[in-house]
Amino acid sequence: MKCQKVQSNLIFFIGKELSQEDEEQTKLHLSACDECSMLYRRVNETINFINIERNEKVNPFLFTRINEKIKNSNSREIIPAYYRLAHAFVFALIISAGLAAGILLGTKNAGYFTGLNSKKDKTTETREFTGDFAFNDEEINNNY
Ligand SMILES: [Zn+2]
């Protein structure tokens, strides 16, 4: 087996994923070739180091703390949605109340300016307004 093939198969050799025949040939080559056996040792050490890092125990409270933060961030998103809805509803209510009050005041006092709500008719109102200071066609006709 050539060095290049052995070196490219090292990972599979370490992971015991080679066929029986390839494994035997790789073992044979490693015992004879210094370059490949040195590379094998380095790769093996690196893989062992990675496995140690991977299997290192994580602080059990870390999971609890992260979980708690996730829960809090979720609940923080739900509550403002309701608050925003309530806020919009209250805002709409205030605007509606303001509009209703405005319309009510407008219609109630409209008579004050236009005489629409006045119980007196236009002629009576005009007569009262002009009073004694102006000539009135009806009075003129009645008097003469
Ligand atoms: Zn070799």
Image (cartoon, helix red, strand yellow):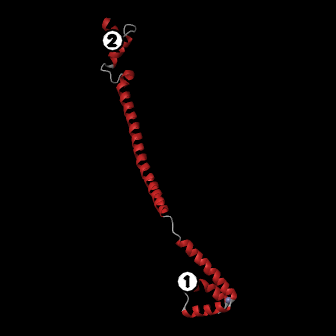
Q: Nearer the viewer, mark 2 or mark 1?
A: 1
Residue 111, how many percent across, how many down? 36, 23
Residue underneath mark 2? 138
Could you say which is closer to the camera, residue 32 or residue 13?
32
Tell me the kind of residue under disc 1: Gly
Vertical placement of residue 54 versus 9, above or below: above
| Quadrant in which ligand 1 is drawn | bottom right
Vertical placement of residue 58 versus 97, above or below: below
Q: Is residue 26 left or right of residue 101?
A: right
Q: Secondary structure at mark 2?
A: helix
Among numbered discs 2 and 1, the one appearing first in the sequence: 1
The picture quadrant where one finds residue 101 is: top left
**In the image as oriented, which residue stretches furthest toward the top?**
144
Residue underneath mark 1? 15
Mark 1: C-beta under 8 Å from nearest atom of ligand 1? no
Residue at position x 56%, y 71% from top?
Answer: 53
Q: CA distance from mark 2 to mark 1?
A: 121 Å
